Amino acid sequence: MSMENSIGIGLLGAGTVGGALVRRLVGESDAIALKTGLTFDVRKIGVSRLHAERDFAVTEGLLTDDPFEVVNDPTVDLVVEVMGGKDPAGDLILAALEAGKPVVSANKELIAARGPELIAAAERAGVPFLFEAAVGGGIPIIRPLSETLAGETLDRVIGIVNGTTNYILTEMEAGATYLTALEQATDLGYAEPDPTADVSGADAAAKAAILASLAFGTWVDPSNVYTEGIEELTAVDMSFAAELGYVVKLVAVCERKDAGVNARVHPAMVPKDHPLASIRGATNAVFIEGAAIDSLLFSGPGAGGDPTATAVLGDVIDAARETLAGAQVAPRIRFSPGEIVPFTDIPTRWYVRLQVDDQPGVLAKIAASFGDEEVSIRSVWQEGVDQEAALIVVTHQAPESAQRAALASITAIPEVIEVASVIRVLGASK
Ligand SMILES: NC(=O)c1ccc[n+]([C@@H]2O[C@H](COP(=O)([O-])OP(=O)(O)OC[C@H]3O[C@@H](n4cnc5c(N)ncnc54)[C@H](OP(=O)(O)O)[C@@H]3O)[C@@H](O)[C@H]2O)c1
């Protein structure tokens, strides 16, 4: 194919993902052309540091520090947004779509915040807006959810969608403290210098919002995603979890109930025989449960320049194919209004670790607090040291609000020295 027929690519950003994408588009162009019949030509790249060293060949005029120049360049047919952040990425994407240019983005933060607006703009323009890399990095999950499984009634999607926290938890399982494990994650480049978005669960919450929206067809705003991070987890709970037959994971749970949908992110005790229990280190996974399909597990590298660039490149090829076909592109997903069920209404199971005065009758009082809220107890474990005892209670499923009410009355029992931790236990679907 001659250069005239090649598709002009404009990149917004050339960092970890963008740099890897440029190297692939240049270095593997022959292989891509052989396999797809398409040739791509990177025509403009927007960066913030014009003179920084790059790990790809920079020709005269390729780079600009004005990202709108990329979008407005008449030789750019397709825009790839890999700069991150909500601003100016959102306005750049809108400008590209309004100019009739297909857009590929890897930006979970922006899509979680402004997804419906961007998807509607693409629909108006009749061009593709694809974001396979926004959740799960190199794992194909957006396309399976929005296309392959479009005809399936999905009940629940559970993801391990943050590699940094899964790495930290895997290390803690092997005995490391939270802080040592976090330090290791930073040294290995998994964690950002400021790891707040990862360890607080905010990154996973943006992904949960996107997964729930695509799985159930009702848009879930990240502000509706109950979010708890891993900062409070201790090695003690990790080892109790192991003794009880669980591993602790930071999970994004998206569920469809009769009353509506719910998405949440929190640490959870995952039974050792559940497929998600075996997802270790920085690996990500998404476990999908549906009426006809039963269950599916997708797993692989959730981040990293090369794997993520593979997902972006797949979108670029897909968008180019659709655009070359010439017709207006049909929307891939439609959102309809629906109820968001508050987390407090969702049935959960709890593991509660208490520090108590080892006196007769304390267990009865704790059991009564649960009983008053109609939370039944599944198992109790006690380990005494001198006058104090560690008491572990695992409950059956009851509404989150009932579990919280029981805990409030337990906290008021004089013999209860401390509620050391509360971790939810992953329950069966429905
Ligand atoms: N890294 C991953 O493993 C991964 C995985 C999945 C999804 N993602 C998503 O992919 C996106 C990019 O991530 P990344 O890790 O590649 O980020 P990165 O390494 O920080 O790269 C960001 C790039 O955007 C440029 N940039 C930032 N702000 C800009 C502005 N205002 N104007 C012009 N250029 C600007 C930067 O320019 P300079 O190079 O000059 O600084 C850099 O080239 C994010 O949305 C991220 O969430 C990343």
Image: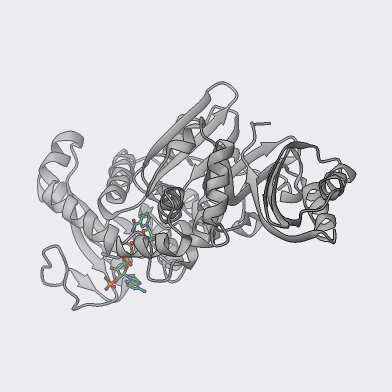
* Quadrant assignment, res 64: bottom left
Name of the residue lying farthest toward the right = 372
* Quadrant assignment, res 186: bottom left
Give the percent coordinates (x, y) of residue 50.
Answer: 22, 77
Nearest the viewer among 96 and 158 is: 158
Give the percent coordinates (x, y) of residue 155.
Answer: 62, 32
Instruction: Assign the N terminus to one quadrant of the image.
Output: top left
- The answer to whether residue 183 is above or below residue 2 is below
Residue at 73% x, 46% y is: 341
Nearest the viewer among 129 and 410 is: 410
Horizontally, residue 51 falls left or right of residue 116, namely left
How many numbered marks, from 0 up? 0
Q: Is residue 280 in view?
A: yes
Give the percent coordinates (x, y) of residue 101.
Answer: 35, 55
Residue at 53% x, 52% y is: 120
Name of the residue lying farthest toward the top = 292
Residue at 28% x, 47% y is: 307
Give the percent coordinates (x, y) of residue 209.
Answer: 56, 51
Q: Is residue 145 in view?
A: no
Instruction: Assign the C terminus to one quadrant of the image.
Output: top right
